[in-house]
Amino acid sequence: MRILVTNDDGVNAPGILALAQSLQELGEVMVIAPEGQQSAVGHGITLHKPLRLDEVDLGDGLTAYSCSGTPADCMILGTLGEMPPPDLVVSGINAGANLGEEVLYSGTVSAALEAALHGFPAMAISVAEYDEPMYEAAACFASQAARALLSSPLNADTVLNVNVPSLPPDKIQGVVATRLGRRKYSEVVLRRDDPRGRPYYWFTGSPIEFDAAPGTDIWAVKQGMISLTMVHFDLTSKQKWEGFAQLQSDCGLPGADSPLCDANRG
Ligand code: MN
């Protein structure tokens, strides 16, 4: 059993060490993670500069590499590079929840999705506390969830997004399947001047939750439960859009009422 571990908080973050140590009971763990902080870089990959991998010592006999790229880069290198392919990919343990639309920004979740797009079973795991997260419950749960994921695989292109309350293991209230809620960051853009008098900008503010209804990931974590959301990359909306028929009649070549670039010239 080979397990590939990554994160977006950087290879030296405490969460990735807790995760790697927990997963060692299942098999051989290899860590490939960004050399520094890559939170909120989303699914970016590096195409215009060279990528470097440097072996680092995390202790505990773990093979670990620091990568100059993004979390998704780490997954490409770990699954398509020179290393033998993993049986499972786990991304985390992130310091801070990845709830609602945070999955779109999250390097942690994006790394798992990247692995899933290449056909590997994958999950992302986060603790819902940024400042002083308690990793123990999440680390224990990670190896349990890894076993479940291997014995009952998810559909293609789907990952398990796990959010664990920052509580001691004996205070966790249960495990529940959820859907994504809605959690938006307050749109505060700080503007200040740097020492040379030039303005700079910094996004800040706390999340505003506007769908934390029962059944959502946000709700589950607030109840002290571990939230499991199956997330997949198909962003196609199933909405029926009335504008489509008109647009197709105007522009849907061939046989359109007017050729594409003549529509507004009549
Ligand atoms: Mn992070």
Image (cartoon, rainbow, N blue to C red):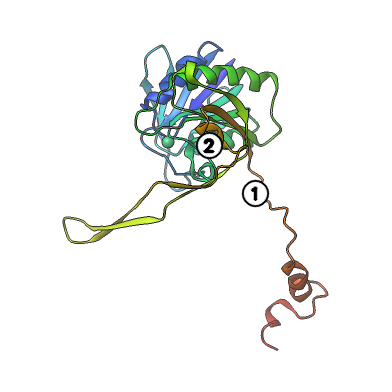
Which mark is first along the chain, 2 or 1?
2
Quarter occupied by the N terminus: top right
| Between 265 and 53, the one nearer to me in the picture | 265
Q: Is mark 2 within 8 Å of ligand 1?
A: no
Figure quarter occupied by ligand 1: top left
Left or right: 203 in relation to 112:
left
Left or right: 259 in relation to 21:
right
Residue 216, x across and y down, in percent: 59, 38
Query: Can residue 85 be seen here?
Result: no
Q: Is mark 1 within 8 Å of ligand 1?
A: no
**Mark 1 sits on what residue?**
235
Residue drawn at x 43%, y 22% is 135
| Callout 2: SS | helix
**Mark 2 sits on what residue?**
109
Within 10 angstroms of label 2, few (less than 14), some, or many (20 or more) residues? Answer: many
Residue 5, x across and y down, in percent: 50, 25
Residue drawn at x 49%, y 22% is 138
Left or right: 201 in relation to 206:
left
Q: Are marks 1 and 2 in contact (CB under 8 Å)?
A: no
Amino acid type shown at disc 1:
Leu
Residue drawn at x 67%, y 83% is 264
Q: Is residue 62 above or below residue 188?
A: above
Quarter occupied by the C terminus: bottom right
Residue 106, x across and y down, in percent: 49, 41
Residue drawn at x 44%, y 26% is 166
| Between 78 and 212, the one nearer to me in the picture | 212
Within 10 angstroms of label 1, few (less than 14), some, or many (20 or more) residues? Answer: few
| Between 254 and 208, the one nearer to me in the picture | 208
Amino acid type shown at disc 2:
Val
**Marks 1/2: CA distance?**
15 Å
| Callout 1: SS | loop
